[in-house]
Image (cartoon, helix red, strand yellow):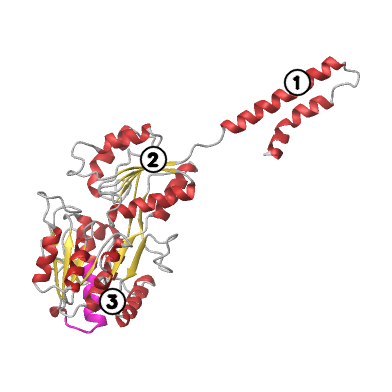
Amino acid sequence: MRWKLMMLLLPALLALGACSSSDDTESALTSQSAATTVAATTVAAVATEAPEPFKLGLILVGPRDDRGYSQAHFEGGTYAVEKLQGELIVVDKVNPADSPNITIPQIVDDMIDQGAHLIIATSDDMKDGILEAAAAHPDVPMIHASGDSAWADGKAYHAELPMLGNFFGQMEYGKMIAGCAAALQSDAGKISYLGPLINDETRRLVSSTFLGARHCWTEVLGKSASDLSFNVNWIGFWFNIPGFTLDPTVVANEFFASGTDVIISGIDTTEAIVEAGKKASAGDTVWAIPYDYEGACAEAPTACLGVPYFNWGPTYLKNAQSVIDGEFTASFAWIGPDWSDINNHDTSTIGFLKGDGLTSANAEKLDDFIASLGDGSLNLWTGPLNFQDGSSFLGSGVAATDLEIWYMPSLLEGMEGPAE
């Protein structure tokens, strides 16, 4: 700061030095006063140029402490603002049950009034609202997590919204790992999937889970595909809304009653692992794999085979920094794991933490499976694959494109449960 001040004062000091030695005392005092004024003005200018803290606006579909999807986003936003010494503006429980009279555009307006520099809407069902808000505020950087409005090759491209971007994690890999862990540990070969609502995203995620389970059941364990049962039931939303959705606790117990020994969760909250923990404590040999949040296994550690989770911090930080640097653009990013260390909090958007319920032998098999995904030697989205109705999805040896996976229109052959 002293160096910068001296450089700013240098012209004034040189001017003083150029004064004739014959200048009278009054002139010298006047010049000194002028220099003092320059110094005071410069210090004031430096003080007023201090940047305001970066403010990140975050819109969550569930509570910020749900030990699931919304908490993962909340902790990702917290990670970013802590790195930037910024501020987090959060509105959570933005869903039809908790906030029936609040709209996304209203929330965005309020966040902008509070000085938000970047606003992120975190749920697929916020799509229409964030599109409307982005149109109303075309100069404000916004991101829709799970959306595709900035994907030039996608079905919902909005070129007229230059400041609305998209990102999402390639959880397809995390779900494949979850499916593999379930198949390795299952004694009965009966795996059930607790699904939220049905759309392209949830169809591709449950299909990825099935592909991982079938591969590890047949190729790793050498068992017959006909001996593997994979059933999915959907509750109707991302989490339980009494009177609107099926109760996930009831659905989980129905799975167990039907002979399922592993439940894989696709909903935002922890009912699957909670119910598995109760059954395991009562002496039943059952397990579960929760979703979204890396701490979810803590609900019932011995019944947990592991958890695929989102680590949003690095992605949040990257986008926030692009706003600070004036380089933000409306881009589409579908972000995979850091295969060198999928559980690195500073680099990997997708992680998988193995649970206490997974045996050491099966953990080693799972590590080999993860390595094969990471080095590209195994691509489970490769044909021959058929849809649930028997029609062809991918021919033999044909790998699915990103578009085919993203806009998954049905479930796969071998899966039980509705696809729409």
User: Can you give x and y, in whole percent of width and height, for residue 386 in the image?
Assistant: 16, 68
Q: Amino acid at mark 2?
A: Pro
Give the residue drawn at x 18%, y 39%. Answer: 100
Q: Which mark is residue 33?
A: 1
Q: Quadrant of residue 190?
A: bottom left
Dot placed on the residue nearer the N-terminal end, 2 or 1: 1
Dot placed on the residue nearer the N-terminal end, 3 or 2: 2
Q: Left or right of 5: which side holds 144?
A: left
**How many residues crowd around disc 1 within 10 Å: few (fewer than 14), some, or many (20 or more)?**
few
Q: Quadrant of the C terminus?
A: bottom left
SS at badge 3: loop
Residue situated furthest front in the rendering: 282
| Residue annotated with mark 3 | 358
Give the residue drawn at x 37%, y 34%. Answer: 112
Give the residue drawn at x 26%, y 64%. Answer: 299
User: Can you give x and y, in whole percent of width and height, for residue 129 in the image?
Assistant: 25, 39
Tell me if residue 216 is in the magenta stretch. yes
- The rendered magenta stretch, by its main secondary structure, is classed as helix
First to last magenta residue range: 209-224
Whether residues under marks 2 and 1 lie with C-beta atoms below 8 angstroms apart, the answer is no
Q: Amino acid at mark 1?
A: Ser
Q: Which mark is residue 141?
A: 2
Could you say which is closer to the camera, residue 252 or residue 367? 252
The vertical placement of 391 against 160, above or below, is below
User: Can you give x and y, in whole percent of width and height, for residue 51 in the image?
Assistant: 52, 37
Q: Left or right of 55: which side holds 266?
A: left
Q: Is residue 388 visible?
A: no
